[in-house]
Image (spheres, helix red, strand yellow):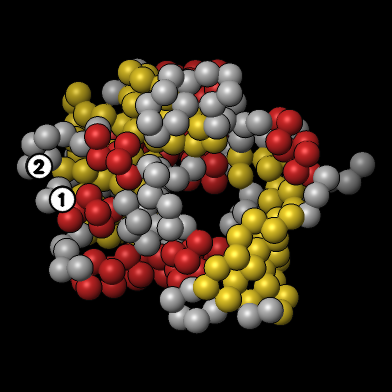
Amino acid sequence: MTKMNRNYKVGDLIYDAVIYDGMNTSMDDLQFYKRWLPKNKAVRILELCCGTGRLTLPIAKDGYDISGVDYTSSMLEQAKLKACEGGLKVEFIEADIRTLDLTEKYDLIFIPFNSIHHLYTNEDLFKAFNVVKNHLKEGGLFLLDCFNPNIRFIVESEKEFKEIAEYATSDGRKVLIKQAMRYENNSQINRIEWHYYINGEFYSIENLDMRMFFPQELDSYLERAGFTVIHKFGDFEEEAFCDNSEKQIFVCQ
């Protein structure tokens, strides 16, 4: 038997800030996160894995004191540029959410946009949860969202090589992305490959490896990390989580 490749990662082109922004234009999650913000705008908000500020900046525009953390400098540079263009003062911090150590504590912390799927081991996950706990004020809220693994979808997707996105970036590149995937049962990692075609020509293959978290598993991990799950939703309209839910969305304390 061949040794399993445990070099899980996200490809550099996926973190190209302009290509990222061109693809990720949906704001379906914004209103959900806004609904859970405290009414008192004197509170402090922390977004982990903020990317280019897709959610950070609209929340800041509403008058909240929000800071954004991300590991990728190119994403943060784009976020800072957009904040400057919008006349917004937002603190963006380049850091690993597994080792983040700030002096401040926050009234609400959230990890949006399926970002926990890139915490590939239980050790990584619990380090991130401990960071949240150490930075959350007493009585503060912790929100996160991720996929609800669909085994039938994964099995069918392994059989096909399909186009998942086609769009133009703000700097004039025409991007086409085709996807292939292979699921590792032992590690619960979905090994996703995005094949990029730029301006009509093949450019590169980029990994988008994602750890799958099954519902009862993630519930127990949050409890073990010291959180109480106040609500668990199956979509951003706050429908109750059920067998057919595409998402797992948590409100914890």
Q: Nearer the viewer, residue 87 or 6?
A: 87
Above or below, 78 against 52 in this view is below
Residue 62: mark: 1
168 lies left or right of 191: left
Secondary structure type for disc 1: loop
- Give the number of the mark in front: 1 or 2: 1
Task: Report the Cα–Cα distance between label 1 and label 2.
Answer: 9 Å
97 lies left or right of 102: right
Which amino acid type is marked by label 2?
A: Lys
Which amino acid type is marked by label 1?
A: Asp
Residue at the spot of label 2? 41
Above or below, 64 against 221 in this view is below
131 lies left or right of 87: right
Q: Nearer the viewer, residue 8 or 141?
A: 141
N-term mark: 1 or 2? 2
212 lies left or right of 72: right
Q: Position of residue 202 (x, y in %)?
A: 72, 75
Q: Residue at x 35, y 47 (%)?
A: 48
Find residue 243 and report its image quarter: top right
Secondary structure type for disc 2: loop
Residue 232, visible in the rendered structure: yes
